[in-house]
Image (spheres, grey):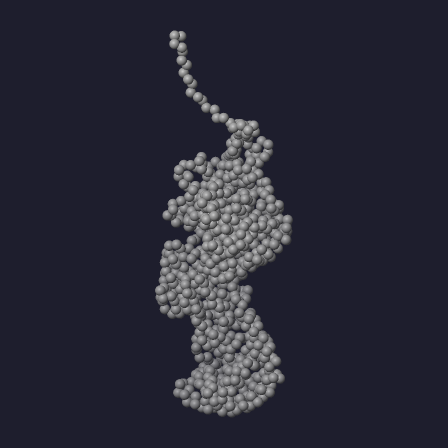
Amino acid sequence: MCKASLNKAIIREPVDGSMQSSVNIFFWKNSVHGLFVTTMPFSEFISHLPIPHYRPLLASSLETGGCPSLNSAWMWVENQFLPNSQAGLGMGTALVRSSSRECVQGNTATIGHCPALLALALLGLLGLLPEVCSGYLSEDEDYYMQELLSREHYYHIPAQEESPVEGDEIRADDLLIPATRKKPKVKSTSGKPTVKQTGTKKTSVRASKKKTEKTSNSISEAERQFLSERVVSLLDKTLAEFLERFFQNFMRDLMSELLPVLFAGLILMTINIGADLIECPPLGLENLKIDDFQLHASTMQRYGLGAHRGRLNIQAGLYEDDLYDGGWCAGRNDPLQWFEVDARRLTKFTGVITQGRSSVWSSDWVTLYRVLLSNDSHTWVALKNGTRELLFIGNKEKEIPVQNTFPRPVVARYIRINPRSWYSGGSICMRTEILGCPMPDPNNYYHRRNEITTTDNLDFKHHSYKEMRQLMKVVNEMCPNITRIYNIGKSYSGQKLYAFEISDNPGEHELGEPEFRYTAGSHGNEVLGRELLLLLMQFMCQEYLSRNPRIRRLVHETRIHLLPSINPDGYDKAAEAGSELSGWSLGRWSQDGLDIHHNFPDLNAILWEAESRKWVPRRFPNHHIPIPEWYQSKNATVAMETRALLGWMEKIPFVLGSNLQGGELVVTFPYDRTRPHRTMREATPTPDDHVFRWLAFSYASTHRLMTDAARRVCHTDDFAKEDGTINGASWHTAAGSMNDFSYLHTNCFELSMYVGCDKFPHESELPEEWENNRESLLVFMEQVHRGIKGVVRDMQGRGIANAIISVEGINHDIRTAAEGDYWRLLNPGEYRVTVRAEGFTTTSKMCEVGYDMGATRCDFTVTRSNLSRIKEIMKKYNKQPVTLRQLPRRPRHRPLGT
């Protein structure tokens, strides 16, 4: 026995009391939750069927007064009867009903002929035929349709003034949001709806502006039971006769007319479905594009666990407190809780990403949830797949993000996540990101205010290892006279660590020209720095060719080194998961599990131990502290990438450098380790603290967001109060950092730039991140020319290597390079500078540093000491100098008797 269900229909009584029937056509679109209604006589409805052969068959069956249910994909749009694919509303169901007195609402009929379902299915398949199909509506039209939906606050169906004309947009009068389950209302001029019919002309229901009276669209339960029996018998008789005649003609025309276009229709449907599966970028919960006022929740445990903390990858503090915790947690554990995001404009939502709560002390996450949508934040509709509500599987632990993509994109302004189940040992807590594409709206105030565009013609995308090499090669071929590609070593898995040099004389160290470096990717999942350096090399090449005076001055006066990926193995892990699913730590460490940035020898402890014993500076130097022997052994726990960096740093006399990191918006400077071992946070300045603070401020102050006091904190610390800079040990202590090692073992002043809250931003966010950091990257490079520079020579004009340069009042020295040149970063002021070299006399002079950009020239000529001359002479004649010492004189004894 084959069964079919009659769905809801509107009863429309004839005015003149006759049995003449009219048709109400409903269309339900799940992804929009809108209901489209139109009314016409049966004769006109039949005349618009796409296959003329079947019009008489349907007309004759309808004249019997029955109530057939045709489950098809047709609807009345703009003066013609079209399949839903042409109306641009996706797959759905158009319900055709007769409005005679025998038609009822909500009954179930049993059809005694099994071929009925096959016929209905084939008839519905006709809606896909390109014979009457012209494609989907554009996104703009879908956007305005949703805007009309959002303004329909009373959810009524006024009578139509006239049928839509071709080219007109669907009006608000034709829309209904059925989420409230309210009965639609029809207005008329005489207490009943007026149906005007003339032959086969178009019928319209006109509503008077002066007189309105409501007519019920529902019937009582008693009437429903009485009429249901009549409907069952009428359907058996009517549909049996109709289907018998229908099949006689349908099979004849199937091979000749329908089958060829059917395949074309299926191809078209496949193309449309593929277009809907395009994934949209994140709205911006993680990168703070979505501000706190756009996040709401049903309840919260406390302020620190409010909706504003429900952002993907947000981190809790080391000591969880009431202000900065690791996610949103509901105040009660029940299925009525929700987390809401207001996109502030109509948005095509495509998916949701969730995490559990970030916490060292507790385990909380959501295991199952549903998604609800709204255009006005009052009426909510659950996301469905057909007629059933969708339940999405959430997290299995608290750190790994889980993404759920909707079956089809849905357009709305508000979106809610309603947890249905959660970890049994915890509470309802989550961090989330929403995937969505804002609909085009040039008049949207919030969009205009936050819109950032770039005019730079650069390759804004995430680059794999192979693509990174290819990009370097392309830039090198564009600017072969000022660029060079070389590698400093290999990673654990054998990938070469490529560096990119920009200089007017690449490959050579020029006397008096400072060396500068940018490194990135020591933590493989912090990808933004890697892409910024790839963008920087493209930008500098293009601007140099365009004769930008600022860029040309930098290239001619500085030797610049860019190392975009220190940890390519870790990047591969993070990139494989994706920008939104790599989490907070996947790919952070090297292939052998080491944190490269903190894998350097701890020279701080060695220096501070010598200082406590009063050995500095006579018995132990305050600079160029040697690397311990145990660290250089083969069995030491040192990453291959770290060893490659050590050799690179010792080979090239870098003056200034920075490592780009992610996950925050701040610049940190040495020391990164506190002196007391048990102290987790304590300001630990270097002797050059005033210089480091200036260098850090030069980057932070020119960044678009770092010093913005109104911006939201990324996680727990408000660095904007400190002008976007902080001493590393004052933030959190870490031994063996690259910054401390560079300062204590080489001449290079190294800082860490945390360039964004999002470690691995979506590809669509790269242009904005470039605009945020571009000026800062250039300004910081220019700081290498601040302070003093010069050459230390002997009387014959030869440069003296490893001469010690000391500045009075600063307990940290530097040394000259192989050719005797040096650079000492200093703030504006007057300084007494002293030069000491083995075998030469000590020489001092006053050097003044001005406020203008450009280092002050301060050269030294030293003479040999007397002891060094004696040693040189004795060595020349193959003799060793003799140390003379005074022997005690013997007392003179006079001969007795004299």
In which quadrant of the rendered view does residue 423 lie?
A: bottom left
Left or right, 423 with respect to 559, comes to left
Residue drawn at x 49%, y 73% as measured from the top left: 31
Residue drawn at x 53%, y 52% as measured from the top left: 490
Question: Percent position (x, y) of residue 632?
Answer: 47, 45
Considering only vertical position in the picture, is 18 above or below 895?
below
Residue drawn at x 43%, y 78% as measured from the top left: 182
In which quadrant of the rendered view does residue 163 lie?
A: bottom right
Residue drawn at x 51%, y 89% as measured from the top left: 239
Question: Percent position (x, y) of residue 484?
Answer: 60, 49
In which quadrant of the rendered view does residue 462 lie?
A: bottom right
Considering only vertical position in the picture, is 153 above or below 781?
below
Residue furthest to the top: 897
- How many badges with numbers are in the image? 0
Residue 805 or residue 186, whichever sits in front: 805
Question: Percent position (x, y) of residue 17?
Answer: 49, 90
The quadrant the C terminus occupies is: top left
Residue 407 or residue 86, whichever sits in front: 407
Residue 170 or residue 5, whichever sits in front: 5
Residue furthest to the front: 896
Question: Percent position (x, y) of residue 505?
Answer: 62, 45
Considering only vertical position in the picture, is 400 above or below 594?
below
Residue 188 visible in rendering: yes
Residue 790 visible in rendering: no
Residue 433 or residue 700, whichever sits in front: 433
